[in-house]
Amino acid sequence: MADCNNQIDCPCTYSGCDKHGKCCECLQYHLRMQQLPACCFPPDVERTYDRSFRKFIQTYQDRV
């Protein structure tokens, strides 16, 4: 797998995350769980830890 770490810019606030800053692993994990990673959400929504597709759509529909 390609080296795709991005430690400095990772917006995830979940302290127990073992994929923090490991973008490829994070994306694979969340897609398997039918979710999106923290970087797809604005900070106020990311802190809710609701990473569902439904929350993503709701978030951006409300902000348009």
Image: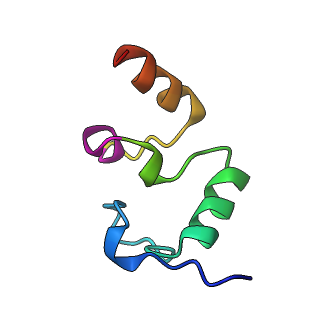
Above or below, 36 relative to 23: above
**Residue at (43, 52) in percent of width and height:** 38
**Residue at (31, 61) in percent of width and height:** 13
What's the colour scheme? rainbow
The segment highlighted magenta reads 42-47
Residue 18: where, in percent of width, then height?
A: 48, 77
Quadrant assignment for the C terminus: top left
- Determine whether, in the image, residue 51 is placed left or right of residue 2: left
Above or below, 22 relative to 53: below
The picture quadrant where one finds residue 17 is: bottom left
Residue 6: where, in percent of width, then height?
A: 44, 75
Residue 38 located within the stretch drawn in magenta: no
Residue 43 located within the stretch drawn in magenta: yes
Above or below, 12 relative to 64: below
The picture quadrant where one finds residue 1 is: bottom right
Above or below, 40 relative to 14: above
**Residue at (25, 40) in percent of width and height:** 44
**Residue at (32, 38) in percent of width and height:** 45
